[in-house]
Amino acid sequence: MKILLFLVTLSWSLLASELIIKESSCSVDETVLNIQNIVKKKGLSVFATIDHGANAKAVGMELAESKVVIFGNPKLGTALMQQDIRSGLDLPLRILVYKNNDGKVNMAYRDGTWLAEHHLLNAPEKIAKVNNAMDKITTRAGQCKKD
């Protein structure tokens, strides 16, 4: 009975995850470049790319390869911030690309419902649009041909 309860609790916590993590078949740099190109082709703005690994190295520390691409649609972001200016703490959107402990490259981002649940937003269509875009961007960005 304890095992069954544990499995039910575990499955519920996995379903309630605020982070979506996908594996990429590309390197960290290739994945980041793919994200940037896809975002630009969609007419969105790439605001910054932060290289956490390089920043760690600059202070004499080690960190697995990891970069964050920060991007968005100012029109959509502004509409959300007009409802709750504090949503600006979580906008623009971002995708973390990193090499995990197994040496595989992953992409991680927050589910858009997290944004709606943590701010006073009533914008289900806009949140669905964010989720759809993030899914498509990461799916395409993680596809690389291997020899």
Image (cartoon, grey):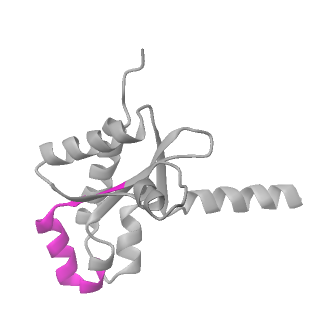
Quarter of the image with the C terminus is: top left
Q: Residue at x 35, y 73 (%)?
A: 116
Q: Do we see residue 63 in this rendering?
A: yes
Q: Does the magenta portion include 71?
A: yes
Identity of the residue furthest to the top in this view: 147
Name the foreground residue: 8 vs 39.
39
Q: Is residue 54 above or below residue 30?
A: below
Report x, y in % for residue 28. 41, 41
In this picture, residue 16 sits left or right of residue 91: right
Quarter of the image with the N terminus is: bottom right
Name which quarter of the figure residue 139 lies in. Answer: top left
Q: Does the magenta portion include 30?
A: no
Instruction: Specify start and end residues of the magenta stretch as a single range.
Output: 68-87
In this picture, residue 85 sits left or right of residue 10: left
In this picture, residue 124 sits left or right of residue 11: left
Name which quarter of the figure residue 71 lies in. Answer: bottom left
Name the foreground residue: 5 vs 142.
142
